[in-house]
Amino acid sequence: MSVEAISRFTGPVRASARQWLTLTGRKTVLVVAHTVTYGKRLLDVVSLLESDFRIQVVFTTPPHELGDGTAGFLAGTGSAVVPWEEAVRTEFDLALAAGPRAMERLRSRVVLLPHGANFLKRLAGARTSQVMGLRRRDVLPGGRSPAAVVLAHRDDLDALARSCPEALPVASVVGDPARDRIVASLPHRDAYRAALGLAEGEKLITLTSTWGPRSAFARFDLLLPRLMDQVRGTGHRLAVLIHPNVWSGHGSRQVRAWLSCWAEQGLGIVPPDMDWRPVLCAADLIIGDHGSVTLYGTLTGAPILLAAAPEQEINPDSPAADLAVLAPALSPVHPLEEQLAYAAAEYRPSAYEAVSARITSEPNRFDRNMRALLYTLLGLGQPAHEPVTRPLPPPERRRVWPGQGRDAGAVVVPGPGAGAAA
C-alpha cells in the first residue's frame, strides 16, 4: 500500500492516514467487516497483529443489507476505516474477512474465517451439503481461491471435501477465538456478575436469539410477557442477547421500541455493539435457540432450555443438532419455575461438555495457530513471545440495565441522566 494511496483517503480515515505517513514501509492488513457480527469476530483476530510495529491494520465496510451500524461500531473502537471503493482499488498485503461477499473485488490475498461457532445452519429444505459457510460460493468467492480458509474443527475438513474439494489445499484447522476467550474468562464469572449488579442469591437468566423467522426473537412477543411475569418476585433477572443482524435488519430504534415495555419492567438488553460473552459467562440459566451463542453457552456450566430449534435449519452434522436433542425444550404450558428446576436437576455436565468439545478440535490454541498462519502469509517472523488469550473485560451494567432498579420484576424508572443504552 503506497503513500500515494494513503494520501487519497478522505473522510473518517484522513487523520489516520496522516499518522501512517510517520511509519512507512509497513505490511498492511485490511479487515473487511460486512456486519457488526463479522467485525466483532475479526477484532479477536487482528489483536494478534496490531501491536506489531511492522504491521498497519485498517478496516473497511462493504455494502451489505445487514451492515447498518457497522461503521459506527468500528468508529467506536478507534479503528482506521478505509472507504470500500478505495479499498478495492488498493493493494494490501493481506485481507481478513468473515464472509465471502464481494471478496473477489479485492486486490489482495484473502483469509476467510467463520463468523460464528462451527457451521450450524443449512438452507431450509436444502440438502445436508448446503451448509451455510461451506458452500462453494462461501469458500471460493467469485470462483477465486482465497489464501486460506480457516476452520475450527478437523471434522469441517470432511464437510468441506464434500461441498468444495477445491478449497481443501488452502484449508487450515485453527480453532475458535470466541470459545477460547469464554473459557479463559470463566474464572472471572463472579466479577462479571458483580459488574452487572447481581446481588448474592440473584439468578441471571440469559435469553439468546439468532436471527431469522425461526429464531427465538420471532417469538419474543409471546415469550417475553410470560418470562417477565414469571420471574417477577423470584429473585431472578432476565437479560436478552439478540443477534446484531436483528438490530441491523429492523433498525435499532424499532427493536428498542418493541422491547420498551419489558425494559421498563426490568428486562436487560445487551446492545449490539457490546460484547455479549461476559453476560453469557455470568448466566445461571440460558434460554436459547439454534444460534451460535446458545452453543457457546454449553461452555459455561449453565443449564440450557431451548425456545426454538427448527430441524429444517440445523446442520444435522453439527453440535447444534446434538444440543437440540440434549437440552430440554421450553414448554408454553408449564410454569417457568418448574422448568428451571427441571433443567437444573437434569443438567449433566459431561453431556454438555461432549457437545462443547465439538466446537473445536484445537481448544485453547486459536491464538497460537492463527498467529502462525497470518505471519506465514505476511512473510514475517512471529514476535518472540507466546500469544496470550486474555479474559474478557467486565460488562457495562448501565448499558444493559440503564434504570436504577434492582428487582428484575419491578418497574424500573430511569434516574437523572440514565438514558437508553446505545
Image (cartoon, rainbow, N blue to C red):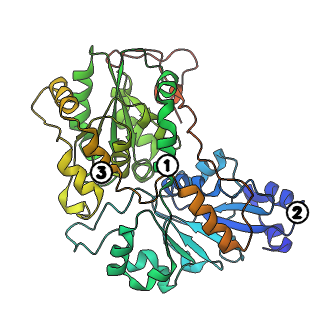
Does residue 349 appear anywhere in the picture? yes
Q: Residue at x 23, y 35 (%)?
A: 347
Side of 306 where 296 appears, left or right: right
Q: Amino acid at mark 1?
A: Asp
| Residue type, mark 2 in image | Leu
Q: Nearer the viewer, residue 180 or 53?
A: 180
- Where's the N terminus, which quadrant? bottom right
| Residue 288 visible in the snapshot | no
**Depicted 355 relative to depicted 152: above or below:** above
Between 312 and 52, the one nearer to me in the picture:
52
> Mark 3 or 2 closer to N-term?
2
- Label at residue 355: 3
In front: label 3 or label 2: 3
The C terminus - image quarter: top right
| Residue at numbered disc 2 | 21
Task: Give the residue displayed 38% in from the left and 38% down from the top.
Answer: 300
Q: Residue 104: horizontal and vertical position, in percent?
A: 55, 80
Label 2's element?
loop
Question: Looking at the picture, does residue 202 appear above or below residue 354?
Answer: above
How far apart, in angstroms, are the residues tagged by discs 1 and 3? 15 Å
Tell me the SS state at disc 1: helix
Extreme residue in the right direction: 22
Q: Which residue is the site of mark 1?
A: 180
Q: Position of residue 112 (x, y in %)?
A: 52, 70
Q: Residues within 10 Å of mark 2 (few under 14, many from 20)?
A: some
Mark positioned earlier in the residue sequence (1 or 3): 1
Give 318 or 402, whichever is nearer the viewer: 318
